[in-house]
Structure formats: C-alpha cells, structure tokens
Image (cartoon, helix red, strand yellow):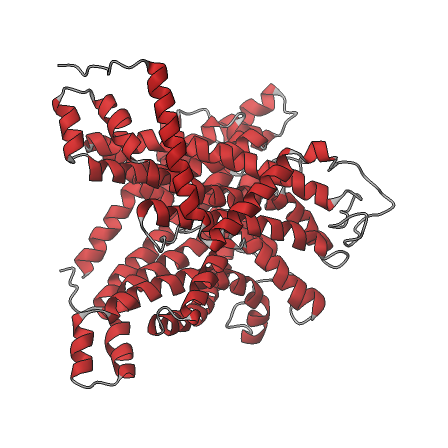
Amino acid sequence: MIGYVARRLMQLLPVLLTASALIFGMMYAVPGGPVGVLVGENATPEQIEKVTKEFGLDRPVLVQYADWLGRAMTGDLGHSLHSREPVAKLIGERLPATIQLALTATVIGLLLGVPLAVASALTQGSWFDRGLSGWSALALGVPTFWVGILLILLFAVQLRLLPAASGYVPFWDSPWQMLRNTILPASTLGLYVSGIFARFLRGSLIAELNADYVRTARSKGLVESAIVVRHVMRNALLPFVTIVGIMLAGFIGGAVVTEAVFTYPGMGRLVIQAIGSRDYPLIQGCILVILVGYMLINLAVDVLYVYIDPRIDYG
Amino acid sequence: MPLRRPARSDAWRCGGRLLSALGSAAEIGKRIVVRKTAALSLAYLVAVALAAAFATTVGFDPLSQNLARMLEGPSRDYLFGTDELGRDILARVVYGARTSLITAAGAVTLAASVGVPMGLVAGFFGGWRDAVLMRIVDLKLALPSILLALALIAVLGRSQVAALTAVGLTGVPTFARVARAQVLSLRRRDFVTAVEAFGASSPYLMFRTILPNSWSPILTQMVVLSSVAILLEASLAFLGVGIPPPTPSWGEMLRTGKEYLYESPTYAILPGLMLTLTILSFDTLGRALSAVLEGREDAPVRRGAGPA
C-alpha cells in the first residue's frame, strides 16, 4: 500500500511540471510581462531596468523557471507582485475556507442526491423516477450564479434569515455562525452536484440490482431492504465514490463563480483577483495548489477503494 | 494503385450529397420533434434566435437611457423593467441573446475545427501524438474550464474575440476525445481497411473515410457544448471579465442586477431566467440528438468539474 501511494505520488510530478512550465511560459507571452505589472504604465526606462535586475527578470527564462521550481519544492512559492506578501501565506489563508465550503457542499449534495437515487432506482420507470431525471437535468443546467442570486433574494432579501454576503467562520470557532455563513453558497453548489450524484448512483444501483447475486439473495428469502443496504449499496458505492471525489476536487478551484456571488473568501476569489491584477506568482501558486489538491483527492479515493472493496489490492 | 475519382462531375456529386444530407436532416428532425420536451426546446431556441436576429428591425434599443425611470419593475412600457441607467431590460436581454449565441456558435466552431483534427491524428497514428493529446486531456480534467478560460482572458485581454477564443479553446479536448474514440472504433473496420488496401493516403483515410462516418457523435457534442459555451461566457461576464460594456450580455446583466437586489429584484431574475432556459434547451436538444443519432437514451454527465 505504501509502495502504491509512493508510486502514485511520483506520477504527479510530470503533470505538475508540465502545468507549471505552461503557466510560466504564459507569463512571458503576455505583452509587458511581469515587469509591466511591477512598474506600472508610466515607468521610465531606468525604473524598468532597476526592477528587472532586482527581480532577476533579466536572466534566461529557463534559469528563472528552474529557480522558481527549486524554491517551490521547499514550499516557497515566491511573493505576490501586489501585496508583496508570500504567496504560500496568501493561499494558506484562503485554503481552509475553500475546503470547508467544498465539504459542506458535498455533504448537502449527498444528503439530497443519495436518497433520490435509491428511491428512483427502486421504483424504476415510475413518475418519481422520471421526475428525478428532470431534476438532475435541472440541477446541472441552471447556472449556479442564478441559483445563488435566487437564494439570496429569498433568504436574505425577503425573509431576512441569512446574510447576503458570506464570510469565513471556522467550524471550530462557532458551528452556528459557520452554518449561517456557509449554508447558502454550500446549498448552491450542493444542488448542482446533487443532480450528478443522483444520476450516477441511480445508474450503478440499477446495474447492480439486475446482477445474479441479487437474484440469489432474493431466492434464498432475504428481505429486500437487506439486499439493498448490505449487498447492492456496497457494490454500487465504488464507481460512485469516484464521482464524489471528482466533484469535491473540482470545488477546490472551480467554485469561482459561487464564491463571487456570495463574496466568499475562498481560493476561487483569490484566483480571480490574481488574474485580474496579473499577479503572476500568485496565479502560478494558486493553480499549482489546485492541481495538487485535485490529484491528492483522487489518490485518496483510490486508496479508499481498498476499504470499500476487499477484492481490490494494489500490492 | 491510386484511388480513381468517379466519373460524375463534381457539381453533380455535390448536389447529390446536399440532397441526401437534407433528406437525412429532415428525417432526424422528425424523430427529434416527436419528443415533446425536445420540440419545446427547439421552438424556444428558434424564437430566441429570431428575436436576436431581428432585434434591430423590430426597434429594440439596448442603449438609450431614460434617467427618469431607473430600476423600475415590469410595466406596460417596459415589459422586463429598466436597469440602473433607465435602459430597457427586455431590449438588453434580446441583444444579450445575440452576444450569447454568436459567442457560443463561434466557440463551438473553433473547438470542433481544432479538436477534431487533433483527435483524428492522435487516434490514427497513436504513439507520441496520442500521448501528448491524452496528457492535455488529463490536464483539462484536473483544471476546471472556468479557470482555464480566466487564464486565457488574462493573456488575451478583454474583448469579444478573447471571450470567444477562451471559451472555444476549453472545448478543444472534448472534441479531440470524441474524434479519437471514433478513429479507434472505426480504424479496423472492413470499409476502412478496404479503402486503405486501395492505397489511400493517411489524410484521405482520416478526413474522407473516417470523418464522414463520425458526424453523429461530433454533431451531438456540438449541441451539448453550445450549452456549456453559453454558460461559460455568462460566467466570465458575471465575474466581470467577459465582453466589455456597453455590449449587453446576460452574465453582465446578472452581475449588475445582483447589486440592486433590494431595489429591483426582477433585474437579476429575468435575464437569469432567459439564460437558464437557453442552457436547458440546448441540453435537452443534445440529449434528444444523442438518443436519435446514437441510440443512447440516457446521455452521460457532460460537465466534469464545470463552472460552479
């Protein structure tokens, strides 16, 4: 197992190298490049030269990349061009907020999606089942920023129950305040994934329900609820866990729009801010962290397989 | 022995092909329209497209300001109300449809015309070309397309062309994957082997033999991706990096409308409704197409980690 994890971690390296090289290359494709951002538009040639020297931007691109890479290995992602603060620190402030939001959203998605999937798989072809496919089409198609706006209109503007703008309150500080602040953005994202969860789980549940072992279990007189809970669910869970993992990972960097609707201080807003101000070290750091997060979650899912399905052995 | 062209003239062949294409299009159309939701979606999209096309003729004016009547709700004069500068929201929604549809059409065309050849080549030759393509597809899976589009906008600047390019490029891997899968499944089929035995060149095999037999999944993907493109364009505009004002765009309207939720709730609701209906219509149409053309009733989830 440890060998497997080590091998998978090694496989991360080429992807990260490609991605970081691409982003690094992109910074030089931009007119003006990092120097332009540093000195502003009305800089004199002397200022430009001074800044270029100071930040080592006169060295060959490959040398600069190697330099950045070497430091990144030790956790030093450079400094933001704007606030001059370490990139690692800026990301470190936002990452917990994003993870908390992503987890809450996934939990809401599961609470909505799993019961729907089970109920519709057991009543295949009924009006309820058809309603579910409509629901998942709706959940997937409706833009999250519109859902978010509607939720704000209802719960903040009309009912005045919840804040329209959500801050980050760590769960350990105040579970109640955390819930008040996170419930709207998390529901927005949760509704979206519940459609995906429900459709996927329904599919794999139906495939399992038609399997031979279910017929055997029925013919030996096992009650239906035990068949579903103890046999079918367990087998249907495997492909489903992958989807849950992919969605959770997607939220690390992909909740950009939802975070913007609720002005939630997560990674997504940090990325927009960085891109908007062309803060290249910050962009690079954010994308790298998002990629690593995505791949680590995928790895965690694969490791989880061993516990869900004892037949799997990575050796 | 090189392939010999048939004796019929080119004009004759083109005409014949056009007729048979029109015939099968009508046939497919018939089979789609019998599905109630698909027919409804098609009708809605046609209505939106017509409104967008003839907006100027009908006399919609998205720019004229009436500062005496700002942020009004729906009324007889302004069916959708007015925005913060007293502009007609209905007119802006109709012009927004134009922005949305043009961007989507351009982006999907761009994505298909870059992605399909990439996928064909990768699948046909395999080896390093395939390896490179698959790494790109992997990267695309890990990075949400909204981030990719944002990064591209950062490089290209903010303009109509930039929005179109950014949205289009994020769709390239999808088409590449579809085309690649088609090559892999058709490459060893008898009709391809037969043409190859006649000495046809690789480009001929890829573009004249395999591609014409791959239109169904590509066409389906184009419709499905239209909805993704519209959502992505609106998301970029909502984040404030889409097509620059004063060009009306649904995402931009939602962005400003969100600032006036207390004063005029319909400002954000109505453009959002139009946007949502358009996206859902393209989705429904895509599912119907995939059912009719490929015999798959339940289309798979199309957005991995979509713009959330």
In the displayed structure image, the side of residue B131 where residue B105 appears, left or right: right
Dividing the picture into quadrants, the one containing residue B269 is bottom right
| Image quarter of the N terminus of chain A | bottom left
Name of the residue lying farthest toward the right: B68
Q: Is residue B85 above or below residue A304?
A: above
Q: Quadrant of the C terminus of chain A?
A: bottom left
Q: Quadrant of residue B68?
A: top right
Q: Would residue A25 be found to the left or right of residue B63 on screen? A: left
Does residue A113 appear in this view? yes
Q: Nearer the viewer, residue A146 or B204?
A: B204
What residue is drawn where x is 51% and y is 46%? Answer: B42
Give the vertical position of B129 relative to B289 (above or below).
above
The percent coordinates of residue A154 (x first, y second) are 66, 66
Residue placed at 20% from the left, 20% from the top? B201
Pinpoint residue B217: horizontal percent, then vertical percent. 34, 41
Residue located at (43% from left, 35% from top): B169
The image position of residue A298, as x and y in percent, is 31, 56
